[in-house]
Image (tube, rainbow, N blue to C red):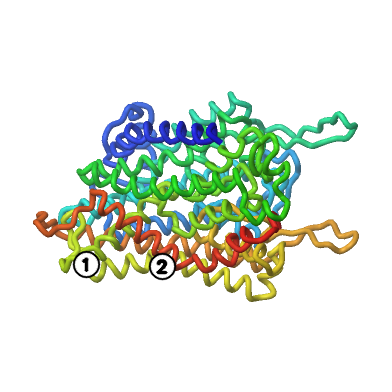
């Protein structure tokens, strides 16, 4: 167990060491400053502006124009990706001869990758052509991540603006984020993964003969190029059905460590970027401290739970090899290459962000350990969160904390010199409450209707309720990880019937939830940015509440926990906590 804590500590040290240099670099990119990659990508950047007919130097956009550009761009890419998924039969790079899946599955998949969710009701290696993987999914991994970061940058500009209206130019932000941030890191990361054994080819699947005399088909494909952006952009959708537990995606403990860093490094570094852009590094560190405290608490809980199990499980006689064998803990659903620490740390990282990639089976976590992914998603992407989305979601809570703190001391709330008034609080409240409302309404509809129950593999019990609740927590929070057998694409049990059919209800409801929970909060955030951009800055006085000290960090953490607990705690009690207090370990 000690070795596991050492592994977690090393990861934290490396992560923290990367925050400042990457945060400074990101700030320079967002401020349109020259960086060391400018000689390489500068001509490409200027060419992109000519193609887009954009003059970023004199085309600042207010929040409505910024939002309009974002929505139009996203709609066009939704149509493009849907067409790619519907025309697989005529595409190049299709050595396995795949055809398109059901229309409702294509709708769900398109909505999933557009929203940075990457929820998957299918096995990629058995469903999608290499062309669809590269031109469709991998491309969308880049642009959906860039959209999230662009919204954050617009909000920061609104906070620091001095009586202005411009939030920058969406097209410029999109181009610079992809060229100077996502693309170069992805190229270097993909080359590293290839060197470690992650495959990258366009070959036909390989048939091998096993020692027992049987045969096995090993899927091939352009995996490394998609794997790195899947982690870096907190997308999460795997090339293979079993995601990052598969050796061709994640071959060793070293790649596991690097891929976890890729998931968390940009969301963490953006807190430093924020402090640099607002002119007060203490502001960025305060937000990082709140995020980190909640994150490390989740890591410790899931790791301890997986090492020990629960008293009910031990009392039931399940404290055998699964708990006290050579591995010293619950190794069910985990890979020996990563161990309990590597799997527990990944489970916490992938659910505090909007990544959703997995290297182990969440449904095989102990009852208490499995509560951590639920709780992390219940905080609605504010503990680091997705690239961009996490910090702008946390900034909404910061504004909410400032408002509540101002009420407590009887003073008009101010944040960085700008008064927080009724309009901003209404917009913040709508943004904060929209995602939980989407989760509860969709999960309730799926639990209460016969169409919804078809997707619940475990039936109507604590395990089945966990499946259902987690599915819509994951989709509404644009995470993409799944719990057990909840599905929109199943095999019928009729004798002799080996075909597959889609569950249209789950595909359509999930797709709508992902789209609504992605773009409604974005519009509210941009509206908040627009409202703040037009405010004058007042000098700080004796009664001004500081937002860069430990007191405010504790207030912020308390409000995040309070909102998350009040919203989802009763539902989590009925699911994973109930499982953890029974003798049943696995559904």
Closer to the chain start, of discs 2 and 1, is: 1
- Residue at (32%, 65%) from the top-left corner? 428
Q: Residues within 10 Å of mark 2 (few under 14, many from 20)?
A: some
Q: Is residue 404 left or right of residue 81?
A: left
Q: Label 1 crowding class (10 Å Cα cut-off): few <14, some 14-19, many 20+? A: few
Q: Secondary structure at mark 2?
A: helix
Q: How many marks?
A: 2
Picture quadrant where residue 27 is located: top left
Tell me where residue 394 sits by quadrant: bottom left
Q: Which residue is mark 1?
A: 408
Above or below 364: residue 460: below
Q: Position of residue 380 (x, y in %)?
A: 44, 58
Q: Is residue 247 in view?
A: yes
Where does the N terminus fall, quadrant-wise? top right
Residue depicted at x 39% and y 45%: 292
Vertical order, 450 against 232 (above or below): below
| Label 2, label 1: how far apart the Cα atoms are | 22 Å
x and y percentages locating residue 102 in the rendered image: 70, 59
* Viewer-closest of 105 and 347: 347
Above or below 563: residue 539: above
For the C terminus, the quadrant is: bottom right
| Camera-side residue of 94 and 276 | 276
For the point 29% across and 52% down, the residue is 553
- Secondary element under disc 1, as helix, strand or loop, is helix
- The reply, left or right, for residue 467 in relation to residue 60 is right
Q: Which mark is residue 433?
A: 2
**Residue at x 48% of width, y 28% of height:** 188
Q: Is residue 411 left or right of residue 511?
A: left
Which x, y percent locates residue 181? 40, 37
> Which mark, residue 26?
none
Is residue 148 at all visible to an observer of this figure?
no
């Amino acid at each position: 167990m000690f070795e596991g804590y050492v592994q977690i500590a090393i990861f934290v040290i490396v992560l923290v060491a990367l925050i400042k240099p990457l945060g400074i670099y990101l700030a320079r990119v967002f401020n349109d400053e020259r960086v060391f990659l400018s000689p390489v990508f500068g001509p490409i950047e200027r060419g992109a502006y000519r193609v887009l007919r954009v003059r970023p130097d004199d085309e600042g956009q207010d929040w409505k124009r910024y939002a309009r550009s974002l929505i139009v761009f996203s709609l066009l890419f939704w149509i493009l990706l849907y067409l790619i998924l519907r025309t697989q039969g005529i595409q190049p790079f299709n050595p396995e001869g795949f055809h398109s899946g059901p229309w409702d599955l294509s709708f769900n998949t398109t909505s999933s990758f557009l929203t940075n969710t990457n929820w998957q009701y299918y096995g990629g290696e058995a469903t999608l052509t290499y062309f669809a993987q590269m031109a469709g999914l991998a491309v969308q991994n880049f642009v959906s991540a860039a959209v999230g970061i662009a919204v954050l940058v617009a909000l920061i500009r609104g906070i620091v603006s001095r009586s202005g209206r411009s939030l920058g130019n969406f097209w410029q932000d999109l181009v610079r984020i992809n060229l100077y941030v996502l693309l170069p890191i992805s190229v270097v990361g993909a080359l590293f993964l290839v060197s470690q054994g992650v495959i990258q080819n366009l070959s036909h699947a390989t048939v091998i003969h096993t020692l027992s005399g049987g045969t096995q088909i090993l899927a091939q494909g352009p995996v490394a190029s998609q794997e790195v952006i899947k982690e870096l952009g907190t997308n999460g959708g795997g090339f293979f059905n079993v995601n990052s537990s598969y050796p061709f995606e994640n071959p060793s403990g070293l790649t596991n460590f690097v891929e976890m860093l890729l998931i968390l490094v940009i969301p963490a570094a953006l807190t430093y970027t924020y402090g640099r852009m607002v002119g007060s590094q203490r502001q960025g560190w305060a937000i990082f401290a709140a995020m980190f405290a909640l994150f490390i608490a989740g890591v410790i809980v899931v790791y301890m739970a997986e090492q020990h199990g629960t008293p009910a499980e031990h009392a039931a006689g399940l404290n055998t090899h699964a708990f006290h064998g050579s591995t010293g803990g619950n190794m069910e659903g985990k890979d020996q290459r990563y161990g309990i620490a590597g799997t527990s740390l990944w489970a916490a990282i992938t659910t505090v962000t909007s990544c959703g990639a997995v290297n182990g089976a969440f449904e095989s976590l102990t009852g208490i350990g499995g509560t951590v992914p639920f709780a992390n998603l219940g905080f609605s992407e504010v503990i680091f969160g997705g690239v961009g989305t996490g910090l702008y979601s946390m900034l909404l809570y910061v504004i909410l904390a400032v408002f509540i703190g101002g009420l407590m001391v009887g003073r008009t709330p101010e944040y960085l010199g700008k008064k927080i008034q009724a309009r901003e609080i209404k917009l913040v409240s709508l943004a904060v409450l929209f995602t939980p409302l989407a989760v509860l309404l969709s999960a309730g509809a799926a639990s209460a209707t016969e169409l919804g129950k078809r997707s619940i593999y475990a039936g109507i019990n604590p395990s089945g309720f966990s499946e259902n609740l987690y599915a819509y927590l994951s989709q509404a929070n644009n995470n993409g990880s799944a719990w057990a057998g909840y599905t929109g694409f199943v095999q019928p049990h009729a004798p002799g019937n080996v075909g597959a059919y889609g569950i249209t209800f789950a595909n359509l409801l999930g797709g709508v939830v992902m789209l609504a929970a992605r773009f409604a909060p974005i519009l509210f955030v941009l509206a908040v940015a627009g409202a703040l951009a037009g405010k004058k800055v007042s000098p700080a006085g004796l009664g001004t509440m500081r937002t860069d000290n430990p007191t405010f960090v504790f207030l912020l953490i308390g409000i995040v926990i309070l909102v998350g607990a009040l919203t989802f705690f009763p539902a989590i009690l009925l699911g994973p906590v109930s499982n953890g207090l029974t003798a049943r370990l696995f559904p």
